[in-house]
Image: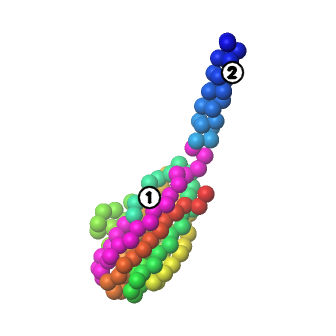
């Protein structure tokens, strides 16, 4: 009976050690899927939390009418409602303009980011998906 108790204790310790060692091996899984009805002059943002390790973030979008610009900024470069409308595109880590698009951006460790949708040419439904590649 004592040997069985020691075996259970050893297995529990091994399990805890595995969780501690492998639990934080990569960035948290990111899978955001949004749909917005937007007009000319509108802007929307999706905030991404900082991760301890670098992330490769994939952004996919489609616009039902006209075009939009989708940009990824460091959060401090596009703060607040004014930031998502007025932050210079030159400060974006990556961006794309069109009726559909797909691009990837590398986020450094411990970097909060904002995915911004703006500069629509017509009122439209915008679908956006943001994922990270692991």
The type of colouring in the image is: rainbow
Q: Is residue 20 above or below residue 94?
A: above
Displayed quadrant of residue 42 = bottom left
Q: Is residue 50 above or below residue 10?
A: below
Q: Which numbered marker is on residue 7?
A: 2
Q: For the residues carrying marks 1 and 2, which lies nearer the camera in this image?
A: 2
Along the line of sight, the residue nearer the viewer: 12 or 41: 12
Can residue 87 be seen here? The reply is no
Start-end of magenta stretch: 24-45
Give the crowd class for mark 1: few <14, some 14-19, many >=20 residues within 10 Å. Answer: some
Callout 1: SS:
strand
Q: Where's residue 8, x and y in %?
A: 65, 22
Along the line of sight, the residue nearer the viewer: 70 or 33: 33
Q: Where's residue 120, x and y in %?
A: 36, 82
Can residue 42 be seen here? The reply is yes
Displayed quadrant of residue 9 = top right
- The residue identified by callout 1 is 48
């Amino acid at each position: 009976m004592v040997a069985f108790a020691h075996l259970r204790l050893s297995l529990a310790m091994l399990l805890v050690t595995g969780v501690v060692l492998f639990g934080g091996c990569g960035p948290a899984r990111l899978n955001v899927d949004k749909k917005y009805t937007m007009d000319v002059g509108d802007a929307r943002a999706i905030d991404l939390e900082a991760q301890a390790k670098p992330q490769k973030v994939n952004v996919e979008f489609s616009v039902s009418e006209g075009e939009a610009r989708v940009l990824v900024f460091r959060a401090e470069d596009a703060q607040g409602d004014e930031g998502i409308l007025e932050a210079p595109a030159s400060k974006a880590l990556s961006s794309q303009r069109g009726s559909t698009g797909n691009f990837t951006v590398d986020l450094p460790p411990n970097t909060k980011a904002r995915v911004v949708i703006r500069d629509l040419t017509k009122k439209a439904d915008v679908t956006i998906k943001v994922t990270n590649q692991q």
